[in-house]
Amino acid sequence: MSQLNLAVEIGGLKLRNPVMNAAGVLGLSANLLKRVYEAGAGCVVTKSLGLHPRRGHPNPTLVAVEGGILNSMGLPNPGASYFANEVKRLKGMDIPVIASIFGSSPEEFIEVARILAESGADALELNYSCPTVGRERCLLDADPENIERVTSAVKDAVDLPIFVKLSPNVGDIVECAWASERGGADAITAVNTLKGLAIDAELRRPILSNIMGGLSGPALKPVALRCIWEITEEVEIPVIGCGGISTWRDAVEFLLCGANAIQIGTAIMYRGLEVFWEILEGVKGYLEVNGFTDVNEIVGLAHET
């Protein structure tokens, strides 16, 4: 019987393993998230939730491009109060839940945070960085001063681990990571999608209704690894890696780069929920073959070379 330990602790949140879904992927109902957990994830992450229901952008909102997916959903969600009942259902099934939230003002962030905290969420992921909405809906983006201020305000308002999801669409992601740490964040999720655009040559116009979208999938992976490397060289809090993880080898590379846990997004679209089991089995095989007994032993090893 294997004696491998896959359990991790991220900012005080204890998980049975380091793999979870990325926000926005299968996160719109308790039933869907239950399937993610049953497929092997260590916890589940909700769709990004705002204070009020939001329809998002009109179609087309998603297009396959070389190396991944370009989406411009526009943060559609049923609102925090509605989804609070879904979180309660998940907690009734003893499933760890990270609630992804956004706001158009610091006060709105705090109100949404309180609603989800009261519903039983185990941690909050603050989405400051959606590239498919204007700053009026997700206002912080590349502003370290605002990141620190809002993170601190939410941290003071709720008694939960606070994770900050950062954008790669910035000049210096370390500045944003420092701001998150100063604001009291318990962990950083790196990274959100990379801003991009696709053109339809026949119609001679942008494909997405919102023109711009966020690139995810394998093409994002080198950018995400670079961001994680830079962040983990400079901050002390844990990092959850996200961006182009499709296989167990990708997952191992993120852990070696310094990520303490990982999120899977676009790969679910192509490989189904089986991707969670496949990645976990692959990571276990890597640990066994290389003489490790604990997944935490390989976190950040690439920095030692």
Image (cartoon, rainbow, N blue to C red):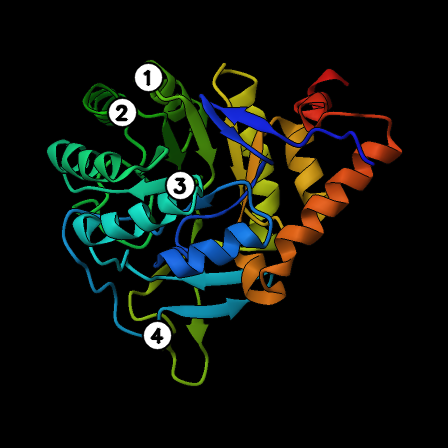
The residue indicated by pointer 4 is: 60
Residue type for callout 3: Val
56, above or below 174, in the image: below
Q: Residue 305, position in %: x, y?
A: 77, 18
Residue type for callout 4: Pro
Q: Secondary structure at mark 1?
A: loop
Residue type for callout 1: Gly
Cα distance, mark 3 to mark 2? Answer: 19 Å
Q: Secondary structure at mark 2?
A: helix
- Circles 1 and 3 in contact, beta carbons < 8 Å: no
- Circles 1 and 2 in contact, beta carbons < 8 Å: yes
Horizontal side of residue 20 vs 218, given as left or right: left
Most foreground residue, 265 or 173: 265
**Residue in view at x 11 percent, y 32 percent:** 107
229, above or below 221, in the image: above
The residue indicated by pointer 1 is: 184
Q: Residue 214, position in %: x, y?
A: 41, 55
Q: Which sits earlier in the primary sequence, circle 4 or circle 1? A: 4
Q: Residue 53, position in %: x, y?
A: 17, 57
In front: mark 3 or mark 2?
A: 3
Residue 131 in view (yes/no): yes
- Circles 4 and 2 in contact, beta carbons < 8 Å: no
The residue indicated by pointer 2 is: 151
Q: Which sits earlier in the primary sequence, circle 1 or circle 3? A: 3
Taking the view exactly as shown, the residue that stands out farthest to the front is 92
Most foreground residue, 291 or 191: 291
The residue indicated by pointer 3 is: 97
Cα distance, mark 4 to mark 2? Answer: 33 Å
Q: Residue 177, position in %: x, y?
A: 41, 23
Q: Which sits earlier in the primary sequence, circle 4 or circle 3? A: 4
